[in-house]
Image (cartoon, rainbow, N blue to C red):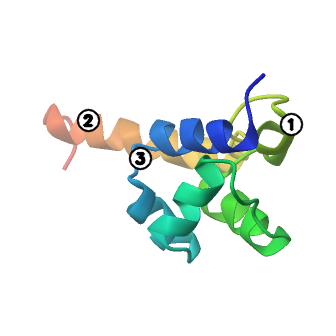
Amino acid sequence: MTTQGKRLKKIRKALELSQEEFGRKIGLTRGAIAAVEADGNNFSQDVLCKLIQTFNVNINYLLVGIGNMFIPPKFEQAQEGLALEVRKILREEGLIK
C-alpha cells in the first residue's frame, strides 16, 4: 500500500519539480517537502488548499490514493489552452501571423 508521502513524491515527479521548486511554489522549504515524502509529517489544511490551487492536485488521491493525481481543468480552460496551442502550430507553419 502506498503512503501519502510516496503519493506526494509521485505528484512532484509528474510535475518535474525538485523538492525545493515544489516547496517554493506552495510556500514551504525543501526540508518540509522531504519530511512529508518520508512520511514524517503531514500537510496542514492550508497547504492542502495550496496544492489544489497551485497544481490541481486531487486531494482524494494524495490522502487516500483514490482517483487520478490531478483534477482535470475546467472545460473552458482546456478549450482556451487548446486554442492557444492550435494558434502556435499555425504560426510555426506560417499559416497565420
Residue type, mark 2 in image: Leu
Badge 3 element: helix
Q: Name the residue under label 3.
A: 84
Q: Name the residue under label 2.
A: 90
Q: How far apart are marks 3 and 1 (CA)?
A: 35 Å
Q: Distance between the residues labelled 1 and 2?
A: 43 Å
Q: What residue did someone put label 1 on?
A: 64
Nearer to us: label 1 or label 2? 1
Q: Which of 24 and 89 is in front in this view?
A: 24
Give the residue type at disc 1: Val
Of residues 56 and 2, the one drawn nearer to the viewer in this rendering: 2
| Disc 3 packing (10 Å; few <14; some 14–19; many ≥20) | few
Residue 13, position as x, y percentages in the image:
46, 39
Helix, strand or loop for disc 1: helix
Image coordinates for residue 10, horizontal then vertical, percent:
56, 35
Quarter of the image holding residue 95? top left
Q: How crowded is mark 2: few (under 14 residues within 10 Å), some or many (20 or more)?
A: few
Choose the circle earlier in sequence order: 1 or 2. 1
Q: Distance between the residues labelled 3 and 2?
A: 10 Å
Q: Quadrant of residue 67?
A: top right
The answer to whether 43 is drawn above or below residue 65 in the figure is below
Q: Which amino acid does label 3 sit on?
A: Leu
- Residue plotted at (38% across, 36% down): 86
Tell me the residue at 61%/47% (across/down). Answer: 38
Dot 1 and dot 2 residues touching (CB under 8 Å): no
Which mark, by number, is residue 9?
A: none
Q: Earlier in the sequence, mark 3 or mark 1?
A: 1
Q: Position of residue 29 (x, y in %)?
A: 49, 73
Q: Nearer the viewer, residue 57 or 72?
A: 57
Residue shown at 46%/72% (left/top)?
24
Q: Disc 3, disc 1: CB below 8 Å?
A: no
Q: In which quarter of the image is the N terminus?
A: top right
